[in-house]
Amino acid sequence: MARLRATFWFALALGVLLEAMLVAAILFWPEFLENLSSIRAMAKDLPVLGDEVLAKIDEQGFPAYVLVQHFFKGCNALGTAAAVLFAAPAIAGEAHRGTLELFLARPYSRARLLSERWLSGALALTLPVVLTSLSVPYLGECVNEYESYGPYLACALHQSLFLLAIYALTFLGSCLSANPTRVALVALFVCVFQFAIYMVKHVTHLSLFRLCDMAVLMPLHEDGRWNAAIVGALVLTIGAAYAASVFVFRRRCP
Amino acid sequence: MSAAGVIQSAGLTRRFGTNVAVKPFELTVGPGGITVLLGPNGSGKSTLLRMLLGLVPRDAGTATIDGVPLAGDGRTVRTRATYLPGELHVYGELTARAHLAWCVRGRDARALERACALATHFGLPLERRVRAFSHGMKRQLLLAAALAPAVPVRVLDEPTEGLDPTHRAQVLELLRADAERGTTLLVSSHHLGEVERAATRELFLRQGELLDEAAARVLHQRARESLRLVFASAPTRVGLERALTGRTLELTLDEQRATLFFPAGDGLECLRLLLAARELPPLRSVVYGELSLAELYRLLYGVEGV
């Protein structure tokens, strides 16, 4: 119960932060649009940002701006951190504090215990992403941009799958370890490294964040085209990591 | 024999790397009574208890509790038995009541009510956070959670460890009452004296092996006919033997410490002779009739350093 309560507060904090960043970004949109040509001129030599991101915003306008600000920047940065923080202590934290034996001694199957924990963290991670994304059309009206909910919901679902993949892999690490700090640090290092190489011209295609950037989200937003290969890979990763977690947890000693 | 309330295992084995923590043997416990599993640290007691409940996966062997076979992750077995962990770790952020509720989740409807009553009986403040509890209070809290559910079997790892003598006696009384109601209790312990007071049966484990029960009983009986002495300075073997001339005894001497066994059962008379012997150094302490677990194991297995 206490853990559920803590998860709820974490989810609420994530939602508030995402919403605050979204509100600030959208209210800044008119000013950004006014200065877009100058910003493009300044960033023209920067890889990825100049030739991809700003060019797309210039071309597509408000939706591209929101996809970058909310999904690529907000959800990928904060969401990734939240995914790691939700998943790392899930099992390793119990082992670290010595309560895993007590946790396992109750008359429930390990699959159920693990699934309850997995699902509560997954919901805490994805609900704020989905709910804040649904506020975009409402906020858009404040800056005279009129959008519908559907495309943002689709983008939020794709973003959720991406974050869930990170969550599921970190959760697997948690099932294998008794040190939540180590699991979190390794996962965060990998994520930060992947985020960093996104901005490096010759290796940007190797970044995992290519799976959830504007190039993937824009077609989904424009005409509902899901990238089957990416979605398939993400779903497969989540499923495999979850199954591996169940398998590892069944053999786990307290 | 009916399987109700019976713990049975055959060939349960567990390895940790190259170390075999529990070697295969046959075990039947219950129905009813308090069976105490004795053994030094690392003898495999806790691993065996955990394996019986599916908390530690087994490498080989079978087990049943109350007629329910240990299968998969042991969920069905855990519906028939409660467990008290040997190592004390709790959710400090919860109140005692919330902790009990968490522990007895999935048990019978009145388990929480009984758990709270037991905790109150121990004098635990139900609305205080568990992080403020002492070691003994945490042990009592987990004991309340393990003793409350209506199950035919309880597996308790060191239930009195860390308790003061008053609370230890209180717990032993509760265990006795529970056993009298027909519950089968499998308990691990380090306290021989306590075991003698509460146990209906004793099992000895060393390095993952179960000692032959009849031999253990004989040796344990023999251990009661012992005298442990600590002298102010090291006595000589000759001096001790001279003081007890004509008596049948076995003597082990380790500097100032001497342990004597009296197969003839005349330990008190021997003690009188030792006290009267002028050539021996003065005595610092005398313990009659109770051996430490290490000494008992030296007897049982004929080895040092257990």
Image (cartoon, coloured by chain):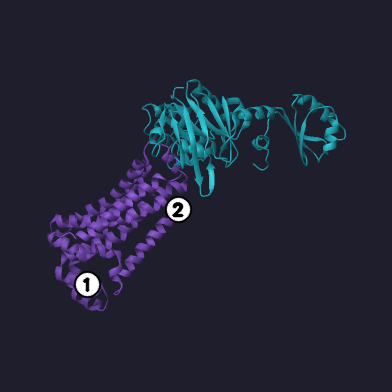
Chain colours: A purple, B cyan
In percent of width and height, residue B104 lies at 40, 33
In terms of depth relative to the viewer, which is nearer, A1 or B272? B272
| Amino acid found under the numbered disc labelled 1 | Glu
B269 up-or-down from A229: above or below:
above
Other-residue count near label 1 (Cα within 10 Å), few / some / many at <14 / 14–19 / ≥20: some
State whether discs 1 and 2 lie on one chain: yes
Q: Quadrant of residue B242?
A: top right
Q: Is residue B66 left or right of residue A226?
A: right
Q: Quadrant of residue A135?
A: bottom left
- How many numbered marks appear? 2
SS category of the residue bearing label 2: loop
In percent of width and height, residue B99 lies at 42, 37
The circle drawn on residue A179 is 2
Q: Which chain letter goes with mark 1?
A: A
Other-residue count near label 2 (Cα within 10 Å), few / some / many at <14 / 14–19 / ≥20: some
Q: Is residue B304 left or right of residue A111?
A: right
The circle drawn on residue A52 is 1
